[in-house]
Amino acid sequence: MEALTWTGALTWLNPILGLSAAIMVAAYTAQIVVSVMPRAGLRSAGGTWRAWIEAQGECSPKPGATLFGQVSC
Amino acid sequence: MFAKTGSYAFRASIVLILIYVLAGIFVGPTAGIVGAISRQLLPVWLALVVTFAVSVVFKRKLGLYGKLFDSTVGMIGFALVMFWVFTGIFGGVFDVLVTHDSLSQVSGMKNKLPGTPLARADATDYPWFLLGGDNLARDVFSRLIKGSWVVIQIAPMATIFAFMVGITLGLPAGYYGGKLDVFLSFLANLILAFPVILIFYLLVTPEIVLTGLPSYMAIVLFIFPLVFVAVLLNSRYYTQPSVRTPVLIAVLGLFGWLYLSMISNDGALVKTSTYDIPGLPAFLDLFDIGPGLLVVFVAVVFVNAPTVFRIVRGLALDIKTRDYVAAAQTRGEGPWYIMLWEILPNARGPLIVDFCLRIGYTTILLGTLGFFGLGLESESPDWGTTINAGRRLLSLYPHAAIVPALALLSLVLGLNLLADGLREESLRD
Amino acid sequence: MTKRTYDGPILEIDNLSISFFTRLREIPAVMDFSVSVKPGEAVGLVGESGCGKSTVALGVMQDLGANGRVVGGSIKFKGRDLSEMSAEELRDIRGSQIAMIYQEPMASLNPAMRIGKQLMEVPMIHAGISEKQAYARALQLVTDVKLPDPERILKAYPHQLSGGQQQRIVIAMALMSEPSLLILDEPTTALDVTVEAAIVELVKDLGRKYGTSMLFISHNLGLVLETCDRICVMYSGEAVERGSIEDVFDEMQHPYTQALFRSIPLPGADKNARPLIAIPGNFPLPHERPPGCNFGPRCDYFQAGRCDQGPIMMQDVPGNERHATRCVRFQEIDWAAPPQMAELKEKGEIGRVVLKMDKLKKYYQVAANSMFGGIAAKVVKANEELSFEAHESETLAIVGESGCGKSTFAKVLMGLETATEGRIMLDGQDIGNIPIEDRSTQNVADIQMVFQNPFDTLNPSMTVGRQIIRALEIFRVGDNSKDRHRRMLELLDLVKLPREFANRMPRQLSGGQKQRVGIARAFAGDARIVVADEPVSALDVSVQAAVTDLLMEIQREQKTTLLFISHDLSIVRYLSDRVMVMYLGHVVELGTTDQVFSPPYHPYTEALLSAVPIADTRVKKKHIVLEGDVPSAMNPPPGCPFQTRCRWKSQVPGDKCETVLPALRRLASDHEIKCHLTDAQLAEMEPVIELDLAAQ
């Protein structure tokens, strides 16, 4: 009996999978990096309190929102 | 733009992985180790496909479980978890997936790499060690499958016990408040403040085991499900004694028997060098839990219960202010009915999510215990113990440790994703 | 700045359609909606919950969330289409030219930031003015919104202020950047009536002072009458009638508007002689709207073949181009025709005394720390010497604002708390000191309660039928489960719900239906005394009438004693036989409905009456605005509890009001009042509400 390799007859697929996985990782990383870059004019929208309202709106009325004792959104 | 590329690449990768798996099902070992494993796991794939097909078709009628199939993250998590559940059931109960006996040693296979053919194979033997051999020349793949059954059994059971304890104590603490709450919360904090590993080491120290402490703790901790079920039924049916009495007798009889079987070993509840407390006689004893397993169980319940207690207490504090609780009070319902039938069902969302997460933690905890050599016997195929055994040769033959480590990782990841999906969906509309 | 140079309409909404997209379907929330707001004008947007009025406001703010989208029409602000503006411009407009005030004041304030800093932030960001100028402006506005001690307020954190004060701060914050348009989304719903009256007064004044246009969103027709110049009535996503206040209130041209006015208790309505007319049927769900007129299925004037064909457009009323209606038959309907009267109801005979309170007192010990002791315990006097009687088939209304002790009283009556002193006699048996677990099943079943919040009154994880059956089980009604199931179906019949509802979950029911289930549950053990804690205040106007009627009907049939707790004096006037007014745990006035609602009043009753918004243009009201807030029950003022806010205090010689607690004295038979004013002074009081019949 021969020793088995990991992917046998499908070895030709490995580079494709590797490439696609690499692209995926690169794209998601780039997306994260772009999203945390400071954008111009982010400060306004009526100030911080509006962001707070929005967070409240999503969070407060759901009864299931309390997880681990505190509100988790 | 990046988001789109990423999502396409993600889908492409998934499709490619599926191709490996599907090709493997048809051509088997021709497609290498992956193909061979894929064919070996055929029953698991079939079960997964059936589960998903049925669930997706009926997802609108299945409540929260059905909603899970609207969330990609939840579906991935569910698939990972169910993969291991089916693997555990098929491999552990029906004995179908494994290629070799998980305990027997095959000569010439010590520390062999994945894909190595058997040195002297009979016609009936599976011709390869798919994931190689460990330092005692046992098949890593088969041990992985057998180990999954151990993990799939113990972690949820221990979590259920922890939940029973946490709920039974957390509800009154939150509902009554006051001194009871202060006292119970103090106890919970005390346990939480204690280093977990230290508790484990203490519990398995022979001197401590000899005093019978784990047995006493088991007697206390395992009675909670019994109390829980009794109170649950009594509070619901006490207005109709003709229904209540037979139901209670039947259920309590069954649970009592299970409880006594669980805590008695060799006809004794507690066995120390100086005294014995007699328990259920051996002919009535349904099953024995090995002393190692008992310690693991007790320890896991003991450290998880306080966290559950705090969650339940917080939820009860919130829900007890609702009008339907006031309505129940004004019609003269007893406190336990209110806690168990008015408050608990409405706290189920967060509790289900936490239950999934907690199985994950427990799995890791069991792995940690196994790694430290606590609890289960050293030849047990469970993943923690296996990782510990493979650790010594990690730099030379990493496969024996990495395979169960990856398995543990994927199961816990699956449970976390599942919990995320459930939480996301339960918060939606 | 070019702020004031534009003189067209401030806001022009033209054929606006907004939809929300869910996983299952598109839900049209607003359809073909048009309205324009001129400079300095206040436009009211009225409708029931779910009619899309808040969605319009969010559309103006261009803040529809991830699922909402404008699918047709345009919103022009000062002539510029908002949908064509860049995110940058929108942000600028939102903060500095359009401001929004939400229902819940606490949600609009950052709890971790001092008031002053939050106020100053607005002009500093949008107008770029210096910190010093911003502080001066903040101080000016806090003075403008009539808050005492502005400098101290600026240094306070939001939680240190009362609800009314918080809402004033939110208004101040909205005005900080001198917006041209102010959107108020139910700004007073979370507040007490007297506080609400003060806030409304303030908004009106400030609107005049700053020339701000306003879009006032409310479900309360009376409030809109008091604040707005024009009104737009919405129903199920569409504007159904639009016009000036006078046009719509006095010459309504849409059946829905008419039905709405007939279902609210205006002065002159009477539960026996002129009962309210509830709108039949239910509000259609957004994805189940009928073809043609949305109101068609509930309309008295419905004509098959015309009202259910194709879309119906807004049409101008001939002779008045600023009055429009969405009804194909509006010119055929005789709008002046009197409503078809339901058959006159026999007034229930008021029977013997069922419940008697005798000097009931309830004090709470507020301990500082239960485990480690410490600071001396404080006493909260929640109820002081309640004495009254309630008769069979009588409705006794208990009126008062939050913190007046009415809920504590209900708790003591139900047995959830025990009385500190005094007695509660139920059929001659003292139950004041018996907690509920020691009361007999019969006693518990006799006194039941209907709760305020319909969304909270039913256990969400149990079917409707199961919940009623559970009440039957606990009251030991019926011998077996079959018996109880039959009785449960009968109870559903009693509250006029279809029997299939037994298998429904509460989330599948509307608010009014849930409230009916709550009533059915309360009557499971044939309750003789029902405490109704604001049973309709959380319901929509059209549903309120139906639920009120149901309560009245059950009362007539079962001779129930109804203790109706409410702050809504219009509904109290409509349905109660006697009224008890409470303030800070004291009964300040007790009498028959007519006695309480006409002079002489207790000064507090007078203020309450004046605060109630009444949706009738003929009503002339005296404006009495109470200063300040209700004092804390922890630290009540000495002497008369109402002395801190009373406008008659100067009429009483000396410092009697500050030092002596007035005794409850009898003015006429059954009319008691707790006040130091002399009989002559009381007799001089003028009625607060006058129906101006000449204007008709």
Image: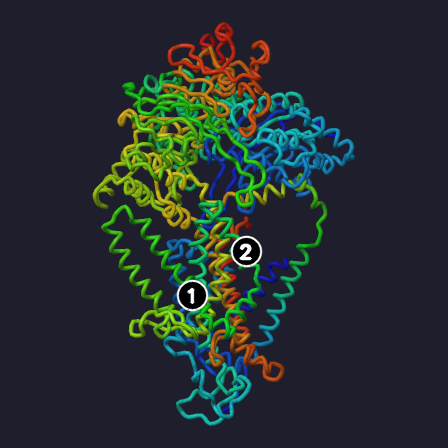
Q: Residue furthest front?
A: B274
When the figure is inspected, residue B385 is found, relative to residue C413, above or below; the finding is below
Query: Which residue is tagged 1?
Result: B218
- Disc tally is 2
Mark 2 neighbour density, 10 Å: few (under 14) some (14–19) many (20 or more): some
**Is any part of residue B84 visible from this angle?**
no
Viewer-nearest residue: C87 or C435: C435
Check the picture and name the quadrant holding the N terminus of chain C: top right
Q: Quadrant of residue C309?
A: top left
Viewer-nearest residue: B346 or B236: B236
Query: Which residue is tagged 2?
Result: B189
- Name the residue type under label 1: Ala
When the figure is inspected, residue C418 is found, relative to residue B4, above or below; the finding is above
In the rendered image, residue B96, in percent from the top left (x then y), is placed at 39, 79
| Chain to which the residue tagged by mark 2 belongs | B
For image coordinates 44% across by 78% down, the residue present is B39
Viewer-nearest residue: C228 or B390: B390
When the figure is inspected, residue B386 is found, relative to residue C644, above or below; the finding is below
Mark 2, secondary structure of its residue: helix
In the rendered image, residue C29, in percent from the top left (x then y), is placed at 49, 39
